[in-house]
Amino acid sequence: MKDVTNIDEVISPEDLALALQAIASSPGRRVAPIELSGRRLWIKRFDVEPLAFAKRLHWLVSPVLYPPFLRGSAPALGEAGVERECNRIAAFRGAGFRTPSIIYRNGAMLVLSDVSPVLTDGLAAASEPHRQALLLKLFAALGQMHSAGLVHGRPHLRDMSLYNGEICFFDFEEAPETTMPLADAQARDLWLVLLPVVALERDETKCRALLRVWLDTAPVEAVMALSRFVGFVRPLLVPARLLPKALQGGDLERFLGAARFLVGANSDMDSAIAASGQRTASQQVES
Ligand SMILES: Nc1ncnc2c1ncn2[C@@H]1O[C@H](COP(=O)(O)OP(=O)(O)O)[C@@H](O)[C@H]1O
Ligand SMILES: [Mg+2]
């Protein structure tokens, strides 16, 4: 039965019939774009691909992982996946952030409006000054989103976009705040964005400028959580240096690149924490 909760854009019965036809004709596809009445929509099915073994294993061992930052979150498959996505969309919209519109939902299926271009495409197409401007916008939006008490969960660059000049968030496949403190989950968001950005950007000064934009807006608890994570990874960098480059896969290389960058930027985190302490102290004196 059709569930109308959270549906915020109307689709005509004719277009809905065409969308359902498209879904029926490609039952094995998890995500597919479809053109209807001159506009593009995205059909997403949460019951198509089984949960990857690695993700299942990560979830199983999560209760004993330390620091909590490393934990996974409960998988949400089928209708539970639609529920998680719609709840997150509602929370983000309620706080004034952009997301796709929910056009239709039924069981394990969701139809969303198009919010292209995703950031991976936007960044690939941008010239140098525009790329840095786009990244600054992204880090500012992340800081604002975190200061509104929200978490994305798995912010891949392909799961955020620049739509009508604003950063737009979608594909909320994880809910890390259910297995770790909110501040850790927000710091984890930042870390996950840094992984591809440090690999892409390489220029440390520019990456520091991006980090500072987040540090200026994010809650101090999230900055402290990030700083604790840096303390955890710092000792791992020494033995990692001994590992021949040929043995480092792309993921490990990105991990080490982002970790080294954050260790080098520790003073920025310390300054942000100190500045927040001074603000609190002067607010207490004023009141
Ligand atoms: N509403 C949308 N607007 C623009 N692109 C989208 C939209 N939904 C999905 N996509 C594209 O399809 C890709 C896969 O969709 P996503 O929701 O991230 O599913 P998955 O869980 O498989 O990662 C996204 O990374 C993005 O490139
Ligand atoms: Mg995705």
Image (cartoon, rainbow, N blue to C red):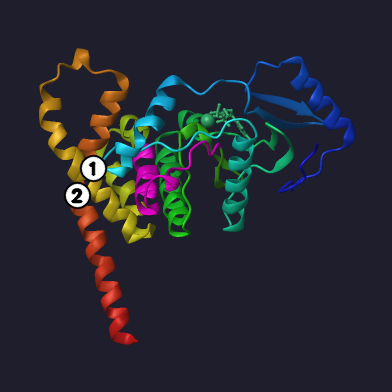
The N terminus sits in image quarter: top right
- Going 57% across and 58% down the picture, which residue do you hit? 95
26 horizontally vs 131: left or right: right
Checking the image for residue 99, the label placed there is: none
Residue 72 found in image quarter: top left
Q: Which is nearer the eye, 139 or 190?
A: 190
- Residue drawn at point x = 40 percent, y = 43 percent: 189
Q: Quadrant of the C terminus?
A: bottom left
* Residue span colored magenta: 171-193
Residue 43 in the magenta stretch? The answer is no
Whether 131 is drawn above or below 49: the answer is below
Q: Residue 99 vs residue 212: left or right?
A: right
Residue 38's spot in the image, x, y percent? 79, 31
Q: Which of the pair 60/92 is nearer the observer?
A: 60
In the rendered image, residue 175 lying in the magenta stretch gets the answer: yes
Total labels: the figure holds 2
Q: Is the C-beta separation of discs 2 and 1 under 8 Å? A: yes
Instruction: Return the residue at label 2.
Output: 266
The yes-or-no answer for disc 1 within 8 Å of ligand 2 is no
Report if the beta carbon of the residue with label 2 is closer than 8 angstroms to ligand 2.
no
Residue 170 in view in this figure = yes
